[in-house]
Amino acid sequence: MELYLPIAQMSVHWLVILGMGGSVGFLSGLFGIGGGFLLAPLLMFAGIPPGVAVATTTSQVSAATFSGVVTHWKRKTLDLKMGTLMLCGGLTGTATGVYIFRLLREMGQMEFGVAVSYVVLLGSVGSLMLAESVKTIRDIKAGRTSGGRKPGQHNWIHGLPFKMRFRRSRLYISIFPPLMFAFMVGVLSAIMGVGGGFIMVPVMIYLIKMPASMVPGTTLFQVLFVTATATILHSVDNYSVDLVLAALLIVGGVIGAQIGVRLGGRLRGEQMRFLLALLTLAVAARLLYSLVVTPHDVYSLTIGAA
Amino acid sequence: MKPRLAWLGFALAFLALVPAATAANLVSGLSQDQIEITSNYTGTDLVVFGAIESRGGESADSPRDVVVVVRGPDIDMNIRKKERVAGLWINRHEVTLFGMPGYYYLASSRPLGQIASPDVLARYQIGLSYLQAARYSSASPKEDRVYTEAAVREETKAKLYAAAEDGVEFLSYSLFRVRVPVPAGVPRGQYTAEVYLFQNGNVVSAQSTPLFVDQIGLERRLYGFAHRSPWVYGISVVLLALLLGWISSLVFQRR
């Protein structure tokens, strides 16, 4: 049955959307990622206008993270103080991102801006992840153990001023790194529809040196509020959140994620990261191709005056 | 459909009684004067039908042609042109076309070139190549032409503009019918169905009938909601998302 999407103003078959939500949910369950960075490009490939794709994906990400936040809250693996601090940076970033998004839309460069952000971010994250996973796989084959990081080690981050104590994470660090990275992720969240967990998690483990057990809960907490805010701001600024599309994606995503989680246990960490890296690079390559290849028609049409 | 046909029959009977004072009388009607876009709307066919009653004798040697144009409400279009910059295709130039039809369908009984001269066709904006915006944001007529052609190409691709040069189906010497496809994605608003009767390269009779296309039901309410109170809409989407996420996590935990 074809469904009419009231905001995207187009008809789609509901199974196509459910299937997309399902497959992205499956991958997010499998790899333990939010999946926003895969969902928005997939929707664009399916012909959903980029603005609607990005804005609606943010609502899907908040739905997907909500149950995770509840679980971590109950298990007390959520550093509320750190989460709130990151939220301050994240919300400022989201507001800035939505504003940039509106500017891009008014300039007629929104599609281009979104695609370039994706190519740069997915390209670099994918390459780093690929290099890291290949190295780990080689090390394991050669029988070497990777040199673990020592928790007491200090780096440049610990020299920054305005330190604050985070009891639950057993940290005493400057407030700037969490604020700064959260701001950056907030901007990306608004422009790309991603939650940003795939940037925040490595930052918190390697740079801020938060205990690994606290990282997922705290990240999810921040992602939940940042994407929820992005959804609301996109609705207000760009009228681009499609409720019907969101509902379909959420339902599909949840079902897919459950299947993914069950299968995910069978893969080893570095193998998963290797596959995820390939997938990330494939999406980046596909988007780059669309920017480089000569278009069928160099003219494009937007309804409404600029 | 049935009552409409009855109406047509009535009109024809009425026509037969009226003495033919003008060169040709044109009567036309629509299968429906309101199209409603609902959640499972995938497009429908509108039928424009009509009859020509002409003065005897003359009609036999000079051919008569019927052209039907269905025009959607005027909308503004922003056309952008991509150019290659450092290997990447990026939008560089733009022209805004104010007052282009949001939908345009043309059906004629013969190829337009055989019916009338370009001057006549342009005057009535009959034919995709004669479409014009009411106003342009650019200053050069040459540029306007290029961007209008691009707009027509894009709208044709989206199936919102179309022309069928054999789209007028004659059921008898004087009775004709045109099927107008109205796809999903047509703009809402007032449409007009214009029927032109051509003889010797000129319009001898014309009739225009209004038609309304509207979104109804949930879609309409959601669209209106999203634009009228965007804050409440945005917050509702988030709450719905959280609710769906929470319910589904409960469902899967029990298993």
Image (cartoon, helix red, strand yellow):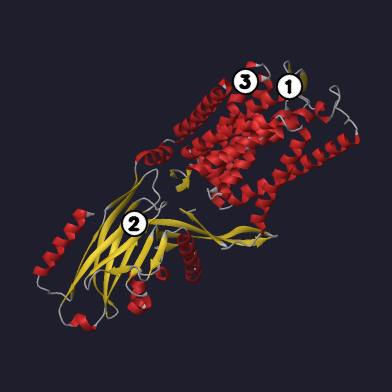
Q: Earlier in the sequence, mark 1 or mark 3?
A: 3
Chain of the residue under the numbered disc 3 shown in the image:
A
The residue most toward the bottom is B61
- Dot 3 corresponds to which residue? A71
Residue toward you, B180 or A14 = A14
Q: Quadrant of residue A202?
A: top right
Q: CA distance from mark 1 to mark 3?
A: 13 Å
Residue drawn 66% across and 49% down? A116
Quarter of the image where the N terminus of chain A is located: top left
Say which amino acid is labelled 2: Asp
| Residue type, mark 1 in image | Ser
Front one among A240 and A12:
A12
Residue located beneath label 2 in the image: B45
Name the mark nearer the viewer: 3 or 2. Answer: 2
Instruction: Name the mark nearer the viewer: 2 or 1.
Output: 2
Q: Residue A42 in the image: state x and y as whole percent.
A: 59, 46
Q: Vertical placement of A168 versus A148: above or below?
A: above
- Say yes or no: labels 3 and 2 on the same chain: no
Q: Are marks 2 and 1 in contact (CB under 8 Å)?
A: no
Position of residue A159 measured from the top left corner of the image (x, y, whole percent): 82, 27
Q: Are marks 1 and 3 on the same chain?
A: yes
- Mark 3: secondary structure: helix
SS class, disc 2 = strand
Residue type, label 3: Thr
Q: Nearer the viewer, residue B59 or A81?
A: B59
Q: Which residue is mark 1?
A: A213
Q: Position of residue A156 (x, y in %)?
A: 83, 30
Q: Chain of mark 2?
A: B
For label 3, the crowd category at 10 Å Cα-Cα, with few meaning under 14, some 14 to 19 and many 20 or more, is few
Q: Position of residue A99 (x, y in %)?
A: 57, 41
